[in-house]
Image (spheres, helix red, strand yellow):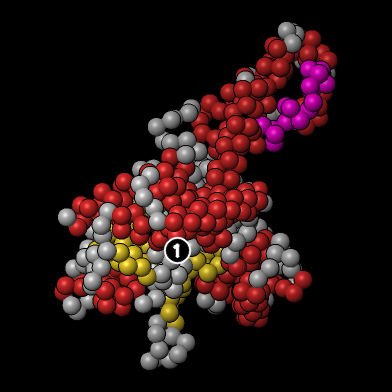
């Protein structure tokens, strides 16, 4: 079971985030599309989901809404860090929001805060 | 502007011009072929100035007659009042002294008018660009592409700069990613610049509805030949519009409406006289524009408040399709179907309008079908400079409305923050 599941359609961003967090010792898995995102979360049961907002086929906010309504309370309560291009300070249902582009240290800090 | 006010303007301007030339009343009067006493009365606005006399006085004062003519002054005074009306209420200009200001300081008045017109033009550009930034799908997609490339480059470059051990395969991947993303960024940025360069900030057309509006404004030429109708959706909307006009004309022909409008200026009484529904009469008045309704405009919305026809009067404040002012009586009518609502309206520019709004309901699918509502608002501009009540302060839509303290405001104005 990974610590973190990254749902991000940009492979270069996904790989960079994966490398940064793996080097900090976290187990990281990737999923590259909005489609099947909720199934990937149910299957992997990660401790944290890093979710991009602008995904093809299905947006991150749609996935987030479905996640929070999941019949399994442990799945519904999965902490979510939302990656957004719009710089919102707060997004309903998300635990944390990080605006792109972000500093690697900021990413590490927010993940540590959410998992430790 | 009343007739007596116009006289005052002309007399004052004659006096100002004579004093500017340091000439005596007697000399100017003699040159114009009138007595000095009569010129004195004119200059103090106690006598009317006929067209021929204006020409003679203008020659005597070595100034173009148009400079002393009433119409030109009226237009300038209206422009000064519009300039004042565009500012917030707390900036209170002495509107009643606009004629005096124009007469005494024509240069400064021209500067003020030109500045107000430039500000109006810049506001239009700002609105167009703002709409592009928030609604244009190509721009949104391209900006997302730029941001994705920047995010990837920043994170990857930081990984490489941070040092520490990086396995060779990951290092190679990051180098390749940097190369690919920097190339993607440069190409996208070039495309973005080219696209921004192509902006026609004087009024780009985006939506089918805007295409139809441009087509109507151009006189509704044949649909298949109309350059303004670029999309299939716009051509379909235009044909629907023509079908509706044809049906309305068949029930209420041009000649019948023209005769009725000549006898009765009130649309309600006109409808009663014609024994036709008011909504039909309103649509036909806006389409035919008979005498007395030359600048009539019409807005139609459905039960959701979405505007399905926008053919406004000149100067009526409109935003892009999909946005509107909640204070328009058009929307009030939806809550009071079959009741005509008359109102006086004032745009942020200071222009005033009379409006007549009416909502109707019908069930095209029978008694079991849904009830459909439509509302329409006939707009009739009042002449600039005409005295009268200010009317309900309306705007185009909150986002581009300068009325900051409006109780109906639902979002901040970009004009207030610009």
Q: Of residues B306 and B290, which is closer to you in this image?
A: B306
Residue B399 at x, y = what percent? 44, 50
**Closer to the camera, B417 or A104?**
A104
Q: Chain of mark 1?
A: A
Q: Is residue B245 visible?
A: no
Q: Measured from the top left, where is residue B180 in percent x and y?
A: 55, 56
Quarter where residue B229 is shown: bottom right
Q: Residue A23 vs residue A85: left or right? A: left
Give the residue displayed 69% in from the left and 36% down from the top: B71
Nearer-the-camera pick, A36 or B47:
A36
Report the residue at 36% width, 50% height from top: B165
Asked if residue B340 lies left or right of residue B217, the reply is: left
Quarter location, residue A97: bottom left
Quarter placement of the N terminus of chain B: top right
Q: Does B78 appear above or below B361?
A: above
Q: Please name the residue shown 63% across and 59% down the image.
A: B205
Identity of the residue drawn at 81% across and 30% down? B52
* Residue in front for this viewpoint, B408 or B236: B236
Residue A114 in picture, x, y percent from top left: 20, 56
Residue to which mark 1 is pinned: A11
- Compared to residue B227, the image places residue B102 above or below, namely above
Label 1: few (<14), some (14–19) or many (≥20) C-alpha neighbours in 10 Å: some
- Eyeballing the image, is B127 above or below B9? below
**Element carrying mark 1:** helix
Residue B68 forms part of the magenta stretch:
yes
- Majority secondary structure in the magenta region: helix
Residue B72 falls inside the magenta stretch: yes
Whether residue B253 appears in this view of the structure is yes
Left or right of B201 on screen, residue B333: left
Q: How many marks?
A: 1
In the rendered image, residue B34, in percent from the top left (x then y), is placed at 79, 18
Residue range (magenta) = B57-73
């Amino acid at each position: 079971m990974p610590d973190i599941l990254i749902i991000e359609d940009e492979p270069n961003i996904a790989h960079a985030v994966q490398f940064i967090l793996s080097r900090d010792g976290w187990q990281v898995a990737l999923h590259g599309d909005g489609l099947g995102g909720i199934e990937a979360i149910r299957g992997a049961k990660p401790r944290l989901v890093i979710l991009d907002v602008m995904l093809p086929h299905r947006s991150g906010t749609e996935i987030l809404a479905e996640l929070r309504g999941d019949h399994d309370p442990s799945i519904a309560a999965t902490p979510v860090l939302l990656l957004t291009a719009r710089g919102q300070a707060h997004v309903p249902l998300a635990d944390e929001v990080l605006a792109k582009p972000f500093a690697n240290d900021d990413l590490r800090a927010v993940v540590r805060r959410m998992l430790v | 502007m009343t007739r007596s006010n116009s006289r005052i303007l002309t007399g004052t301007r004659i006096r100002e011009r004579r004093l500017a030339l340091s000439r005596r009343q007697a000399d100017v009067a003699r040159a114009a072929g009138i007595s000095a006493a009569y010129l004195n009365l004119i200059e103090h606005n106690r006598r009317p100035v006929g067209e021929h006399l204006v020409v003679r006085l203008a020659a005597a004062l070595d100034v173009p007659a148009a400079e002393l003519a009433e119409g030109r002054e009226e237009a300038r005074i209206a422009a000064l009042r519009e300039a004042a009306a565009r500012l917030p209420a707390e900036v209170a200009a002495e509107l009643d002294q606009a004629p005096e200001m124009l007469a005494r300081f024509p240069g400064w008045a021209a500067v003020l008018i030109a500045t107000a017109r430039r500000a109006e033009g810049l506001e239009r550009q700002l609105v167009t660009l703002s709409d592009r930034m928030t609604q244009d799908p190509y721009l949104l997609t391209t900006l997302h592409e730029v941001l994705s490339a920047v995010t990837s480059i920043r994170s990857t470059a930081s990984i490489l700069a941070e040092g520490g051990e990086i396995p060779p395969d990951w290092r190679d991947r990051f180098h390749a990613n940097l190369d690919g993303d920097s190339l993607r960024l440069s190409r996208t940025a070039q495309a973005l610049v080219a696209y921004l360069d192509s902006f026609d900030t004087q009024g780009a057309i985006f939506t089918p509805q805007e295409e139809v509006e441009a087509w109507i404004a151009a006189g509704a030429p044949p649909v298949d030949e109309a350059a303004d109708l670029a999309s299939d959706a716009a051509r379909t909307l235009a044909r629907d519009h023509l079908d509706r006009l044809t049906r309305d004309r068949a029930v209420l022909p041009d000649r019948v409406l023209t005769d009725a409008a000549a006898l009765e200026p009130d649309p309600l009484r006109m409808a009663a006289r014609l024994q036709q529904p008011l909504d039909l009469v309103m649509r036909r008045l806006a389409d035919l524009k008979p005498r007395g309704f030359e600048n009539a405009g019409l807005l139609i919305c459905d039960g959701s408040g979405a505007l399905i026809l926008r053919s406004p009067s000149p100067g009526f404040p409109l935003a892009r399709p999909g946005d509107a002012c909640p204070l328009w009586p058009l929307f009030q009518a939806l809550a009071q179907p079959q009741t005509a609502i008359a109102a006086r309206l004032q745009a942020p520019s200071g222009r005033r309008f009379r409006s007549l709004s009416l909502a109707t309901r019908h069930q095209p699918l029978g008694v079991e079908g849904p009830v459909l509502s439509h509302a329409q608002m006939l707009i009739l501009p009042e002449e600039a400079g005409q005295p009268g009540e200010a009317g309900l302060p309306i705007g185009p839509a909150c986002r581009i409305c300068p009325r900051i303290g409006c109780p109906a405001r639902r979002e901040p104005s970009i004009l207030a923050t610009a």
